[in-house]
């Protein structure tokens, strides 16, 4: 290869190396405070119940809860992609907002592009005539690259290297051949010393422009994307921890996503929260919606029916209606501990049939997966029934 051609390839390779080194340095040295990172992520996500606002800008309770989740995930070490995936997967109606277009963002991409084009023009615009020896060297370089490419093909066919390595090496050697092909073929002649110095200056300047442009583009990509894994890898499989979400936020999300088949899980969680608080009037419509939902799974339906049965008994003393709801729950999930235990309680305390209640409690205890605290409560009730004690309720 001619000195000019050899330098062209060397400078381009040097440019790539320097650019990648710059990106590595940025990734190692650039520090973004957690608060700034949370704001940046928050500005990417649209508030589900707002009018075109991001969760970082909205003052709604839902947006505040979503930002709290973002901060919690940042503190736990999650990547931008993981955080955004979890938000989008957990809050129906949350979507990514398009990045704002500004003069600074346009300049960041257009200026390096212009520099890149200028550098390429300066590197390939001039032709230099070389001696026969240099022409022979050029041909040897090209033949070597061709041999390397053919060698990779042979190794692939022989199974000596895996497909990924073969693809990477093949792409590398093809790129080298393309660079050599784009450099004008050497023609016999000798350029004057002054012309050589002029060419060297142009080569250095052009290569510098290439290095600068490539580094700026990659650093810009690093800064703007913020995460090498990207943010579009899909929807998160997990669900948000609802313990950190307020009742008002859950009500808002449910109201905004009534037709979403996955909303039953949040409905049930909200109903259970109201039930635990003793707010039966608030829990009732949520349980009813889950029990009547075509999208709810059997466990959700059974839980809703069980709670409705217990509230009917405890709130109004209606034993027959309560037992009907519990029996319906057991038809959906035969042998399920919750409806079975509540049925035993009502049989003992409401129907005043201790013997039947004892049999039901015994059936509950057969379940090997029973929560230890629940098992202890059932065992205590069974002991009380067998000893003839009165119902504690």
Image (cartoon, rainbow, N blue to C red):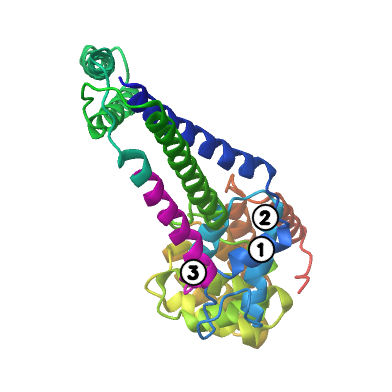
Q: Could you tell me residue 180's position as x and y percent?
A: 27, 28
| For discs 2 and 3, the disc positioned in front in the rendered view | 3
Q: Nearer the viewer, residue 148 or 70?
A: 148
Q: Would you name the residue on which mark 1 appears?
A: 38
Query: Quick check: marks 1 and 2 in contact, CB under 8 Å?
Result: yes
Q: Would you name the residue on which mark 2 appears?
A: 74
Q: Quadrant of residue 286?
A: bottom right
Note whether 211 is above or below 155 in the view shown: below
Q: Nearer the viewer, residue 271 or 162?
A: 162
Q: Nearer the viewer, residue 213 or 204?
A: 204
- The tag earlier along the polypeptide, 2 or 3, is 2
| For discs 1 and 2, the disc positioned in front in the rendered view | 1
Q: Is residue 40 visible?
A: yes
Q: Does the magenta-highlighted stretch encompass residue 105?
A: yes
Q: Residue at x 79, y 65 (%)?
A: 389
Note whether 85 is above or below 277 in the view shown: above
Q: Does the magenta-highlighted stretch encompass residue 214?
A: no
Q: Could you tell me residue 162's position as x and y percent?
A: 32, 20
Distance (Cα) linking label 2 and label 3: 21 Å
Note whether 85 is above or below 268 in the view shown: above
SS majority, magenta:
helix
Mark 3: secondary structure: loop
Distance (Cα) linking label 3 and label 1: 16 Å
Q: Would you name the residue on which mark 3 appears?
A: 99
Query: Quick check: marks 2 and 3 in contact, CB under 8 Å?
Result: no
Q: Could you tell me residue 117's position as x and y percent?
A: 37, 51
């Amino acid at each position: 290869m001619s000195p000019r051609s050899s330098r062209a390839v060397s400078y381009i390779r040097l440019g790539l190396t320097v650019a990648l080194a710059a990106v590595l340095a940025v990734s190692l040295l650039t520090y973004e405070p957690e608060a700034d990172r949370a704001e940046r992520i928050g500005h990417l996500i649209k508030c589900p119940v707002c009018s075109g606002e991001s969760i970082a800008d909205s003052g709604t309770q839902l947006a505040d809860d979503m930002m709290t989740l973002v901060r919690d995930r940042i503190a736990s070490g999650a990547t931008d992609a993981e955080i955004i995936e979890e938000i989008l997967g957990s809050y129906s109606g949350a979507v990514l907002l398009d990045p704002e277009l500004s003069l600074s963002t346009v300049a960041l991409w257009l200026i390096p592009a212009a520099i890149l084009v200028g550098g390429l023009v300066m590197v390939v615009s001039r032709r230099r005539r070389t001696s026969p020896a240099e022409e022979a060297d050029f041909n040897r370089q090209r033949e070597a690259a061709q041999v390397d490419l053919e060698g990779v093909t042979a190794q692939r066919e022989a199974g000596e290297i895996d497909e990924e390595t073969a693809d990477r090496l093949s792409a590398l050697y093809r790129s080298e051949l393309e660079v050599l092909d784009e450099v004008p073929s050497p023609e016999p002649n000798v350029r004057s010393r002054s012309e050589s110095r002029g060419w060297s200056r142009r080569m250095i300047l052009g290569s510098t422009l290439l290095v600068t442009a490539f580094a700026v583009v990659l650093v810009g990509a690093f800064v703007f994307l913020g995460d090498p894994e990207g943010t579009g890898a899909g929807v998160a499989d997990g669900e948000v921890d609802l313990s950190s979400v307020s009742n008002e936020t859950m009500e808002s999300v449910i109201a905004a996503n009534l037709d979403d088949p996955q909303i039953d899980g949040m409905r049930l969680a909200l109903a259970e929260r109201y039930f635990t608080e003793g707010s039966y009037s608030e829990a009732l419509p949520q349980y009813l919606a889950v029990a009547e939902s075509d999208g709810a799974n059997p466990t959700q339906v059974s839980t809703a029916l069980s709670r409705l049965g217990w509230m009917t008994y405890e709130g109004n003393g209606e034993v027959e209606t309560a037992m009907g709801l519990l029996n319906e729950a057991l038809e959906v999930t035969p042998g399920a501990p919750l409806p079975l235990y509540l049925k035993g309680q009502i049989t003992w305390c409401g129907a005043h049939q201790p013997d039947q209640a004892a049999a039901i409690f015994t059936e509950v205890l057969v379940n090997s997966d029973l929560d230890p605290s629940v098992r202890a409560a059932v065992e205590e009730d069974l002991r009380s029934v067998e000893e003839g004690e009165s119902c504690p309720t």
